[in-house]
Image (tube, rainbow, N blue to C red):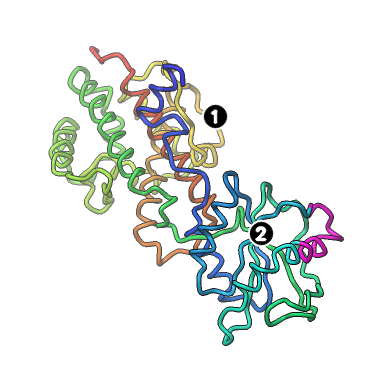
Amino acid sequence: MNPAEQENAADGTHPGAFADEQITPARLARAIRGRLAVSACELSGFWFQVRGNRAAYAQELQQHLAGDAVVVLVVRGAPFDNANAVLDDFVVLLEENQEACEKHLTGDPATDRRAVVLLARNTLQLPQVSSPVRLPAWFPRLGGRTPSVIIEDLTWRAESPLNTAEAAVDDLCQRLFELEGALLDRLHAVCAQKRAETASFWDQVRREGEGPSFADFLDGVRRTRREVRNPSSYRPSVKEGSSLVARVWGKVQATPPDGMGKLGKALARALALEEAPDTDWHRSIVAVLFRPSARPPSDSQAFATNVLVTIGATCQMITAAAHADAYPSYPVPLIRSMSFDLRQALAGARKTLIALDRYTG
């Protein structure tokens, strides 16, 4: 790792600083159990891509599935590359692993559901259509029969509630807290030297009945932050509005995409940003998806708008994870990727703000 990469890794902007990309065997086992619980098939096939040691992954996954009528097999010889022969390849794999199938598929006689998990180097590049397959005579409970089988690729479909460990909610909270600190430092410096530069942004986030002093608000937020003992559990409250990110979150929620330009312009001015911030920063996918119909007229406004939308999305994800029982489950890779993207944007924005020269007016 070169010096620049080491610096990025230290503050969390290097991809390697975030969570492992592979779904854990424990998480996959829970996804398999969930699918079996609602399956109408006597025999299910689940395909999963493993990028590391498949034998070790198979051993751990089988341990997590102990007591279930599920066998975990590593795909080695059978190609699984022809839609017309995929179930023939499936039977060949079963024949090659007869001992393991007999050991793990006997299962509970009270259940009719059985499953075969296939661990491969690649995703399954074939249509997933249910077809009948004649099973070997020795196959537990279903030997010699011709049940319909579908092999479902779980690589991108294994689902989990939003509070899954892969969401790295504690890291999201930590990075949100750290970005707020960098924003407060910059806003306080600009406000102290030239309060007029921060007036427009303060008008946007100020609540009815609140005093005219932005500096007093910033000081109050700083006092509140000193009471935070565990930044990895930092959860802003829009209702209380005692934090800067909570004010931003509430404003973003109430502002349509085409209105974000005005809010971004106000923040860019309050931060006294140059036309092009010197350091690299990551534009989050939510900032791209909710970009105003008119392109931001300057790089400084694009940066500020990215900060606003990313903060709003991060707060929403943290809150949704805290109330995961009220929301559907989603594919783990999607949750992980969204969290990674938000964390990268938060860390990049903080780094950019810290790199700005001290404001002197």
Regarding mark 2 in the picture, which secondary structure is present there? strand
Identify the amino acid type marked 1: Arg
Identify the amino acid type marked 2: Leu
Residues at marks 1 and 2, CA–CA distance in whole angstroms: 47 Å
Q: Which residue: 45% across, 64% down?
A: 327
Q: Please name whichever residue, 160 or 323, is drawn nearer the observer in this view of the structure.
A: 160
Query: For mark 2, what is the residue?
Result: 118
Query: For mark 1, what is the residue?
Result: 295
Determine contact: label 1, label 2, CB under 8 Å. no
Instruction: Count how many numbered circles sit on residues in the image.
Output: 2
Lower sequence index among marks 1 and 2 = 2
Q: What is the x, y in percent for residue 271? A: 31, 24
Q: Is residue 91 magenta?
A: yes
Q: Which residue: 30% across, 41% down?
A: 174
**In the displayed image of the protein, which residue is found farthest to the bottom?**
110
Q: Which residue: 32% across, 44% down?
A: 173
Q: What stretch of residues is rendered in magenta? A: 79-92
Q: What is the x, y in percent for residue 269? A: 34, 23
Work out whether 294 lies above or below 100. above
The quarter of the displayed image where residue 68 is located = bottom right
Regarding mark 1 in the picture, which secondary structure is present there? loop
Q: Is residue 357 left or right of residue 23?
A: left
**In the displayed image of the protein, which residue is found farthest to the front?**
99
Q: What is the x, y in percent for residue 291? A: 52, 37
Work out whether 85 lies above or below 250. below
